[in-house]
Image: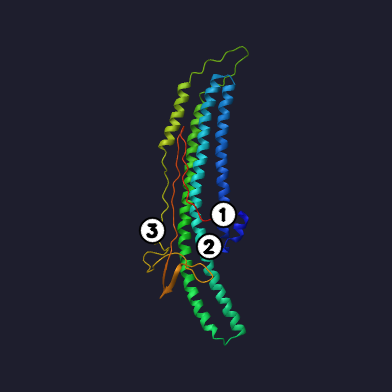
Amino acid sequence: MASLRGIQQPELSKKLYKIIKSENHAISAYETAGRERVSIASQVSDWGEATGDDSVSDISDKIGVLMSELGEQEDVFAQNLEDYRSVLKQIRNTESSVQPSRDHKSKISDEIQKLKYKEPQSTKLVQLEQELVRAEAQNLVAEAQLTNITRQKLKEAYDLHFAATIERAEKQIMLARHGRRLLNLLDDTPVVPGDTRPAFEHTHQARQILNDAEEDLRDWQPNIEPIPSSATELGSNLMPTNVSTTGTSVAEHNDGLMPHGGEVVEGRYEGQGAIEESHHGGQTGVLGTTHDNVDQPQSQWVE
């Protein structure tokens, strides 16, 4: 069924449909990697305990906690990528809505050319040419709406993507540095047969390192330059607010989708409809806490 949906996509939205679907696979891979990391962390802790070495047991247990948190961060990253993917869907849906208006204009133009060749004196030519003028005007509005939403949502989507990448990287570095601090507590001085290693004396320090890691994650704040946008000047109809228009989105016209019940009147578009937007933020957890899933908007596109 997934491949069938891809075939049924309008030509204009096929490439973005493929990107969105590929991102879905990538997100699933990050989620799987996160689960595997948590599982491995547990195995490291269990192995350390089985060695019978108190020092190795304590350090491996703390390492397991940090590795488990690294796995949790993969899940947070996946949630943030889902937000980015949802924004891309808004571009795709607009592309899908514009395709019929292009097809309708092209169809009328082809009919005119055929009729001029077969019946150059036909009275139907005048009717078709008037219909073509209307179709071109409607398509002009649709194309403007498409380029507006494409630029706005492209910036918004990849702003989310890159911000999530920076968050994941900074938190991974943070956890890795604390992990290296733990390793410094383990004495690896060689012993000869019969020697007894001294008792582990850094239990408190090891615990403090975990506390420091938890505090660092809790206190983490994004420190990135905002992406400037002029999209605040874009009205709900996907047109600049200083343009005299009423309604939004792409109109319906006979064989295709264009804004619902709309028409072009003296260079202005009048109609109804709107493209909904949603914005979500990922949640960040700390050591020993769980991450609540962020509810994602249900799209009309099943993937």
To which quarter of the image does residue 284 belong? top left
Image: 252 above or below 61: below
The residue sitting at 54% across, 71% down in the picture is: 104
Q: Given this view, does label 2 or label 3 mark the residue nearer the observer?
A: 2
| Sooner in the amino-acid sequence: mark 2 or mark 3 | 2
Q: Amino acid at mark 2?
A: Ser
Asked if one can make out residue 64 in the rendered structure from this viewpoint, the answer is: yes
Q: Is residue 268 left or right of residue 120?
A: left
Q: Which mark is residue 19?
A: 1
Mark 2–mark 3 contact, CB under 8 Å? Answer: no
Q: Nearer the viewer, residue 153 or 11?
A: 11
Image: 222 above or below 97: above
Mark 2–mark 1 contact, CB under 8 Å? Answer: no
User: Can you give x and y, in whole percent of width and height, for residue 88 in the image?
Assistant: 50, 55
Q: Nearer the viewer, residue 107 or 22?
A: 107
The residue sitting at 58% across, 78% down in the picture is: 111
Mark 3 surroundings: few (<14), some (14-19) or many (≥20) residues within 10 A? few
Q: Which mark is residue 96?
A: 2
Q: Nearer the viewer, residue 212 or 11?
A: 11
Q: What whole-number distance in Å separates the C-alpha atoms at marks 3 and 1? A: 27 Å
Image: 261 above or below 3: below
Quadrant position of the N terminus in the picture: bottom right
Q: What whole-number distance in Å separates the C-alpha atoms at marks 2 and 3? A: 24 Å
Residue, disc 3: 232
Image: 104 above or below 49: below
Q: Amino acid at mark 3?
A: Thr
Q: Amino acid at mark 1?
A: Ile
